[in-house]
Image (cartoon, rainbow, N blue to C red):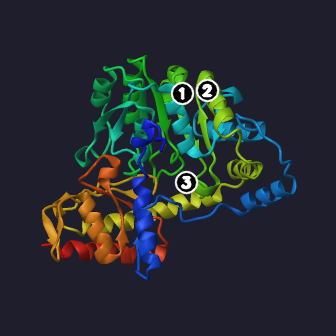
């Protein structure tokens, strides 16, 4: 029998989806399951998005579309990023794809040859490591433990970039930690990047509209516009607008990068469907009340989760300032057991927690931090107090 390509031996199923699938199976078997596993918004887009989609169906041409993305969608995206502080971009600097994950994979194909190095902080989104493995890149992981609030320091970045990685990949606000870098922190990192001209910089900032309180989102380009010739901004509709299944992602960056995305699209997907285009334009250009309200709600939910974690002796949980994740260090549980079931590490913890209490969380090792776990607090609001109580009870029962 013919064999698969060697790259498939490096391709792994999503750790997050594996946990979610196990939770779904247990629920189908009649178990009372509360899932904190998948980072899926718990809301839908505004009515104007659905109206635009319905109208597009009635007017559907059935034809192929632009490999870059239609002008109307590019223009809506340009206005969207202008409001976020990105100035001077034109259509030629942008491209559209099937979600941010697709854009990140296209960027890896465009920028990384086998053996090239990509650097990124840990904790990281699981897909970063998966994509690097598939394209055969070497990975330089920059550990950022809870003791430094899961944030990369300028000193760490300077040392990493001295090795001249081909790509530096950065995520702000962070999935899985929910941490948001301050103005001064981003400015300091931008100054370091400016010292190392041989590295492409990808800012995967799809949660940039989900920042809590008085803190604001900042990007390297806000402080060093001279970096525009090698900084690539990645965005998506999924989290901000409650549209993960619509699969619309974007990049804005140097013209040569945008053109590379267009070329890859022409060979991979051709275009995104007209219905998704219409919905995306409506989301970006229409009323913004739903996203704004959800940021307030997520901030309040974050506070509930933090209070529950603070009540558990030994658990350390840096305060997230964005997205919809909490990433507590639960290593105080390692070496203990739950009614005879050993808790040796984060994977054991999550497996036993799911089996014993019906609560699904993702082990931190999936994100490069094996002392933690990720809680995505986008479950139905009524389930949150019960889910937190079950986790607290689980800890109390450890011996």
Say which mark, if any, is on residue 260. Answer: 2
Q: Which residue is drawn at 42% across and 17% down?
A: 198
Q: Mark 3 or mark 2: which comes first in sequence? A: 3
Left or right of 50 in this view: 126: left
Q: Mark 1 or mark 3: which comes first in sequence? A: 1
Where is residue 392, by image quadrant?
Answer: bottom left
Q: Residue at x 43, y 52 (%)?
A: 14
Q: Is residue 29 visible?
A: yes
Q: What element carries label 1?
A: helix
Q: How crowded is mark 3: few (under 14 residues within 10 Å), some or many (20 or more)?
A: many
Could you give the CA–CA distance between mark 1 and mark 3, rounded to whole angstroms?
25 Å
Task: Name above or below for residue 94 compared with residue 76.
Answer: above
Mark 3 or mark 2, which is nearer to you?
Answer: 2
Q: Mark 1 points at which residue?
A: 110
Q: Whole-percent x and y of residue 390? A: 31, 76
- Residue positioned most to the front: 1
């Amino acid at each position: 029998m013919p064999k698969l390509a060697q790259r498939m031996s490096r391709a792994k199923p999503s750790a997050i989806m594996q946990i979610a699938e196990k939770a779904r199976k247990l629920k189908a078997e009649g178990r009372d399951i509360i899932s904190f596993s998948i980072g899926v918004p718990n809301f839908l887009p505004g009515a104007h998005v659905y109206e635009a989609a319905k109208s597009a169906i009635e007017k559907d041409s059935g034809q192929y579309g632009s490999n870059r993305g239609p002008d109307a969608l590019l223009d809506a995206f340009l206005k969207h990023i202008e409001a976020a502080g990105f100035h001077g971009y034109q259509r030629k600097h942008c491209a559209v794809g099937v979600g941010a994950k697709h854009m990140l994979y296209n960027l890896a194909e465009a920028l990384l040859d086998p053996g090239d190095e990509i650097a990124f902080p840990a904790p990281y989104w699981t897909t970063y490591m998966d994509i690097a493995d598939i394209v055969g890149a070497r990975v330089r992981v920059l550990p950022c433990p809870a003791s430094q609030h899961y944030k990369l320091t300028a000193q760490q970045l300077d040392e990493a970039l001295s090795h001249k990685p081909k790509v530096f990949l950065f995520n702000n606000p962070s999935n899985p930690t929910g941490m948001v870098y301050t103005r001064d922190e981003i400015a300091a990192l931008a100054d370091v990047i400016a010292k190392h001209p041989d590295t492409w910089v990808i800012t995967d900032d799809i949660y940039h509209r989900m920042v809590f309180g008085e803190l604001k989102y900042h990007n390297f380009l806000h402080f060093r516009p001279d970096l525009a010739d090698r900084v690539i901004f990645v965005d998506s509709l999924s989290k901000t607008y409650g549209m993960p299944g619509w699969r619309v992602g974007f990049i804005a960056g140097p013209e040569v990068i945008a053109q590379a995305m267009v070329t890859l699209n022409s060979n991979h997907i051709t275009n995104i469907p007209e219905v998704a285009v219409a919905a995306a334009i409506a989301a970006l250009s229409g009323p913004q009340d739903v996203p704004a309200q959800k940021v307030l709600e997520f901030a309040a939910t974050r506070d509930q989760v933090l209070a529950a974690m603070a009540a558990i002796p030994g658990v350390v949980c840096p305060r997230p300032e964005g997205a919809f994740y909490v990433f507590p260090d639960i290593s105080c549980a390692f070496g203990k057991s739950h009614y005879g079931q050993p808790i040796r590490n984060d994977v054991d913890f999550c497996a036993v927690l799911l089996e014993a209490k019906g609560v699904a969380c993702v082990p931190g090792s999936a994100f490069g931090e094996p002392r933690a776990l990720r809680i995505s607090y986008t479950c139905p609001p009524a389930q949150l107090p019960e889910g937190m109580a079950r986790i607290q009870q689980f800890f109390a029962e450890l011996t």
